[in-house]
Structures are given as C-alpha cells and as structure tokens.
Image (cartoon, rainbow, N blue to C red):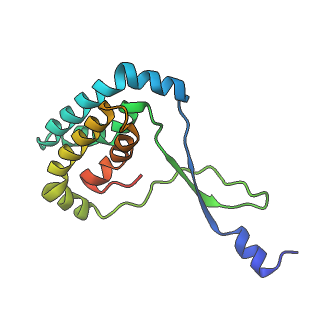
Amino acid sequence: MLSAVESEVESMPVAAQSRAGPGFPVRVLWFVLIGWWATFLCINVAWLLNATIIFLPIGLWMLNRVPKVLTLQPERTVLVGRSTRGGDLPRQPRAVPQEAFVVRALWFVLVGWWLSLIWANLAWAAAATIILLPVSVWLLNRLPAVTTLHRH
C-alpha cells in the first residue's frame, strides 16, 4: 500500500516537450540551399501581410513558422498529464497557456508590428553571417513572442 506522500507524488502533474524532425545533416543542407534566402522572403512577406488587417492571420502564422523555414526546426509539442506508477506520461498534447487576447492584441498594435520587423531582419542578417547562426536561431525562436507575446 502506498503512503500518502507516495500517492501524492504519483498524481502530480508532469509536463514534457517532444520534438521530432529531420536530422542535423538534412537541416544543414536545407539552410545552405534554401533556408537562408527563404527566411528573408518569409519574414518580409509576413510583415507586409501583418500591415494589412485582412491578411494579418496569415502573416502571424508565417512568423510563427520562421524557425522552421530557416533550419527545419521542428515545432515543440508540450505534453501534459499525470505520472503513472510506471513513470510513463500519458501523451496528451496541450496548448501552452497564453496571455489574454486583449493584452496580446494591444502589444501587437503598439509594439509588436514594428519591433518584429526589426527583430526578424536582424536575426536574418545574423544567420547570413553563418558565424552568428546560433544567435539568429535564438532570436527567431523568440519572434512569435516579440510579435504577439505568443508562447510555445
């Protein structure tokens, strides 16, 4: 029989992140042949779409996928569940909690639309140097948060 402490530990919520995608050599080849120039296009087309009200959702969708365009970086899947006796985590993808829509919308209108353009193009310029590619990836991974406070 389990003690009260062991029972409490077993039922504690657990979160894990899952990533699946192409291997490192494929990602490097993608970056060299396609990613560096496609990212520039993606960033600037997305920003132009964001400047319109009608195509804003498409522009934001594109910005959220910039790291994937640059290096085929897989999207994170957050798995949330309760641990079981065997220590396995039930595979139940859950959305990461986001700021309130009103807060995110105000951020985008006041700051996100212009800061994201500067941020993304600086990140692209860093990627183009190859030496600063890790900095670029770090910046681009945060682009959704800079634009709309989106968490992933």
Please tell me which residue is depicted at 28% across the width and 24% down the height of the picture. 37
Residue farthest toward the front in the current orientation of the protein = 131
Above or below — where is 4 with respect to 27? Answer: below
Where residue 72 sits: x, y (%)?
44, 31
Above or below — where is 65 with respect to 105? Answer: above
Count up the numbered dots.
Answer: 0
Q: Quadrant of residue 68?
A: top left
Does residue 96 appear left or right of residue 149 in this picture?
right
Nearest the camera: 41 or 77? Answer: 41
Q: Quadrant of residue 44?
A: top left
Please tell me which residue is depicted at 32% across the width and 27% down the height of the picture. 36
Does residue 112 appear left or right of residue 66 in this picture?
left
Above or below — where is 152 with respect to 99? Answer: above
Where residue 115 sits: x, y (%)?
18, 51
Residue farthest toward the right in the current orientation of the protein = 1
Please tell me which residue is depicted at 45% across the width and 36% down the height of the picture. 73
Nearest the camera: 77 or 129? Answer: 129
Above or below — where is 84 with respect to 59? Answer: below
Please tell me which residue is depicted at 54% across the width and 41% down the height of the picture. 19
Where residue 34 sits: x, y (%)?
35, 21
Q: Quadrant of the N terminus?
A: bottom right
Nearest the camera: 90 or 138? Answer: 138
Does residue 17 appear left or right of residue 122 in this picture?
right
Residue farthest toward the top in the current orientation of the protein = 33
Where residue 75 sits: x, y (%)?
46, 41
Nearest the camera: 132 or 68? Answer: 132
Residue farthest toward the left in the current orientation of the protein = 52
